[in-house]
Image: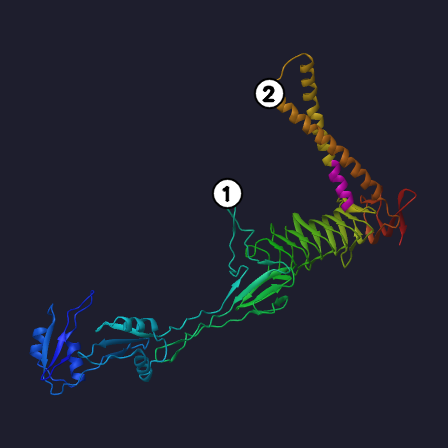
Amino acid sequence: MICEENNTYLQIEPPSDGGEPAGINEIMEYLNSRSIEFDSQALYAVIGKTDTQKLRLNRNSHMEERENYKLVISPDKMQAIVRFYAPSKGGELMSRTELISDLGFKGIKFGVQDVEIDKFFKSRRYCENIVVAMGKEPRHGSDAYIEYYFNTDVKARPTLKEDGSVDFFHLNTISHCQKGDMLAKLFPEDLGEPGKNVLGEPLKPRDVKKKKLKYGRNITLSEDKLILTSDVDGHVTLVDDKVFVSDVLTVDNVDNSTGNIEYEGSVQVNGNVCANFSVVAKGNIEVGGVVEGAYLQAGGDIIIARGMNGMGRGELKAGGNIVAKFMENASAMAKGYVSSESILHSSVQAGDEVTVSGRRGFITGGRVCALNSVTVKTLGSSMGADTVVEVGVDPTLKFRIQQMQKEIAEAARVVKSVQPLLTATQQKLAKGIKLSPDQIQYMKSLIALSQVKKKEVETKTAEMESMQDSLGNLTSAAVNVSGVVFPGTKICIGDSSMIVQSQMQYCKFIRTGGEVKMTAI
């Protein structure tokens, strides 16, 4: 504005440095805010011109207008925007301190943009939006979450073989864990950080969900309550967001629904173990039903409540004892004792003793071996089934000796088969016949093979002889029959044996004078 002696003019400057021209609405608002009358038609006539325009105003007072501004706060209160208006010619300028004080009076308490304000006071530019205050957006946090380091999907999925076929015996239904394994980790919630608008009002970040680790026994929670670790070897499951670890795996049956089981702890089968499946456990195996033609191996005991029908292929191996109601057409090996009510056409070996008692209490057919004793009610069969009972020799050691005999024989066979070729080659060389490089390489491989197998024969023969020396014979070993022993039954004690010639009752077989003798109980 220009205030002269008798008139007041509004001077409208064209935009500079890429600025925008003043809008008519903004000019009218400015004049109306100061109660200055003007000719709107005349204003429309000069607005938008590219050169400087002067508009005479209807104003009686010739008071100079100070530099001033218009403040706009954004609807979300996150920005305060100022548009400065030039003073009249010779009018007073606003100071920076005045502006800051005035903004505070109008409620601007946070985020004042000193740099932008300083920039204006160093180089005044009018009718432009200047952000003089900016709020701080809240930093939104995140929900807590838990990572589980085991398979939480309980759906059975068969193993895919290399040839593309599906192995339904291995269903991957068990998540094994070792003592000390990390099972789960909690990543705590991030609460975020509050913000503020330009009025200084706090802005709350969004709410986040909290979580905590839930767990059962055999699990340790770290001091910071962020990590779960297993206290035992076993298996881990997740039920309703709660982690459970057990060293006893319990299943209803071992069949197509479970596949084969291989477990670090003990296994309890409430029902049956079906044919062709296997259960391997480092602890005990307990079966509430029957075991069909399956394979069971336990580091501890095997207990079968209703017995085993091996179907000629079923096998039991226990690092401890074996207890089964009956065993039929099965193979069983225990480092401890074997206890059953009947053993029919089976191969049984025990590192301690075999006891067959109960109402039936018979051993019929097959071979039963124990280190110390075999106690049975009825031994053999009236039908003449081949039955062999052996005591006084460690069956596992004897079994290993038998294996070594086969391995020695195989190695000796290889040496014997290679020797004619080596002899023939030596004869050719003696006659001056030259061999091709391939023939030489082949002969070198045969020589190396022969040397390896000869060494194997020597080593295993020495080892086998040592085993045989330690095999020994237990003078206290005996076979006890509390009922009937039928003719044709073979009794072996140590390296002595006899075949029962006639039916006997209530007798005991011992070794004396290098022979097996029968005495009364």
Answer above or below: position of 119 versus 393. below
Dot label at residue 163: 1
Q: Quadrant of residue 89?
A: bottom left
Image coloring type: rainbow
The residue depicted at 31 percent of the width and 76 percent of the height is 76
Answer above or below: position of 208 versus 380. below
- The quadrant the N terminus occupies is bottom left
Q: Quadrant of residue 263?
A: bottom right
The residue depicted at 69 percent of the width and 21 percent of the height is 422
Pick whichever, 175 or 262, lies toward us.
Answer: 175
- Disc 2 or disc 1, which is closer to the eye? 2
Given the image, on which type of amino acid does mark 1 rest? Asp
Numbered disc total: 2
The residue depicted at 65 percent of the width and 23 percent of the height is 443
Q: Quadrant of residue 361?
A: bottom right
Answer above or below: position of 475 versus 136. above
- Relative image position of residue 67 (x, y in whole percent): 23, 79
Given the image, on which type of amino acid does mark 2 rest? Pro
Q: Which residue lies furthest to the right in this view?
A: 513
Q: Residue furthest top?
A: 431
- Relative image position of residue 483 (x, y in whole percent): 82, 54
- The quadrant the C terminus occupies is bottom right
User: Can residue 270 be seen in this snapshot?
Assistant: no
Is label 2 in a helix, a strand or a loop?
helix
- Please provide the residue range marked out in magenta: 396-405
Q: Is residue 64 left or right of residue 334?
A: left
Q: Mark 2 points at which residue?
A: 437
For disc 1, the neighbor class at 10 Å (few under 14, some 14 to 19, many from 20) is few
For disc 2, the neighbor class at 10 Å (few under 14, some 14 to 19, many from 20) is few
Answer above or below: position of 126 versus 425. below
Pick whichever, 189 or 254, lies toward us.
Answer: 189
Please identify the dominant SS of the magenta region. helix
